[in-house]
Amino acid sequence: MSIPSQGEQREKLITSLSPQLRRHLKIRAFEHGMDIQDAAEHAIKSWYTTEDPPEVDTKGAKTWGTFLSPGEPDRFKAVCTDRGVTYVQGLAQALTLWLEAHPSPTSPLVAQPVTRVIVANQKGGVGKTFIASGVAQALAEAGKRVLLIDYDPQGHLTAELGFEDLMYEDDVETLMMHMDGTAKGDIHELLVALDQERFGERLHLLPASDDAFLRDVALSKVSFSEAALERALEPVEEDYDVIVIDGPPSLGLNMDTALYYVRRREGELADRSGVISPVWANRASHRAVRLLKRQKDDLCHKGRITVDYLGLIINAYDSRRGKLVTENKDEWEKSSSPSVLAIIGDLKEGREAADGEIPLLEYAPDSEHAQVMRDLAKELAV
């Protein structure tokens, strides 16, 4: 999601865009040294002068927004009306034409670091573990090498995947020990593989440990604690395509280290690594996201870094719960930053898989829940 820098006077355009077009725009803008919002505005302005642009398939388009120069959102909508096309179709035409006019440079894209995603919301019970686990499974099923990290001191992810006993083993080094520099062994020794055939030995778990509840206190004694998780994980990064973190249900140093880890690194594509927040369609989730964004923005300001907010996932949605639930869902969808990546119904498969300590894609591979996870995996598989 493109956000204007401080001091710029921009106006927001909210419409919808297919995940495929969004991915192509993100990569191509980077290749040409442009910000996503500048590329989008350039595309729209060129579209104004194009006669009879071809219709574009917009199937699967999801809410997406960008910031344009003053007056441009209204101008774009007016031109769409004059041409008899929807805003979604108009934007798709503009971006498709821009991509055709701006092919990839002859020099290859700079090698990208491992994709790093934290599933985070300081409000508990919104489905962090469910989303983190499901997306990691879908990525591994699709052929990616994935490390799934249980960074929540409660250890629900570890337990739900059938590895609860590992949380309480004696005389075993922990992630915290690798973060504070007291570990003597190799962090690879902490990892366990999910052995289901569909994951092809590509999905590994770094389990929770019982010292994780003390992580905030321990980190307060570590020099440059924000980088502690990055220092700990550096030896394993080259082994994976994607690292997914099930974040803690709290704010503080523990969260700071995870947010710092998923920051945009030098030369990395925008909106590639970053934060995904599961939410419910209620006011408490709105407040929780505001608090998380405040902590993220404060860390970015003080550390002079950029942490991309990849989007929201509305979880356990059921319109039958009343008007306020529907209104809150609509409010989430109208937001362009962060945008809504998916809406997941209040279905039983996720709960049953967790209770049975079986990965969701193994327990119910053909379920609606499983398909949503595969769609989300495609969003991250750049």
Image: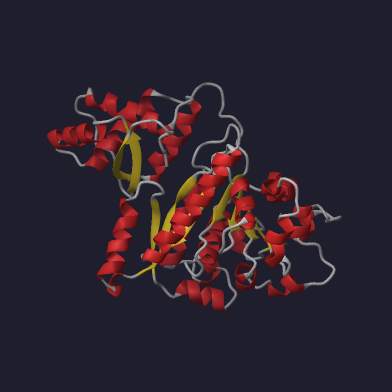
Q: Is residue 374 visible?
A: no
The reply, left or right, for residue 135 in relation to residue 162 is left
Q: Position of residue 380 (x, y in %)?
A: 50, 48
The reply, left or right, for residue 232 in relation to residue 306 is right
Residue at 64 percent across and 57 percent down: it is 254
> How is this picture coloured?
secondary structure
Q: Position of residue 205 (x, y in %)?
A: 67, 61
Q: How many marks?
A: 0
Q: Position of residue 191 (x, y in %)?
A: 73, 60
Which quadrant of the structure image shows residue 140? bottom right
- The image quadrant where one finds the N terminus is top left
**Relative to 274, is 75 above or below?**
above
The reply, left or right, for residue 137 in relation to residue 81 is right
Q: Position of residue 74 (x, y in %)?
A: 21, 35
**Relative to 235, is 193 above or below?**
below
Residue in the foreground of this view, choosing between 22 and 35 = 35
Q: Is residue 371 visible?
A: yes
Residue at 60 percent across and 55 percent down: it is 255
Residue in the foreground of this view, choosing between 7 and 355 = 7
Which quadrant of the structure image shows residue 112? top right
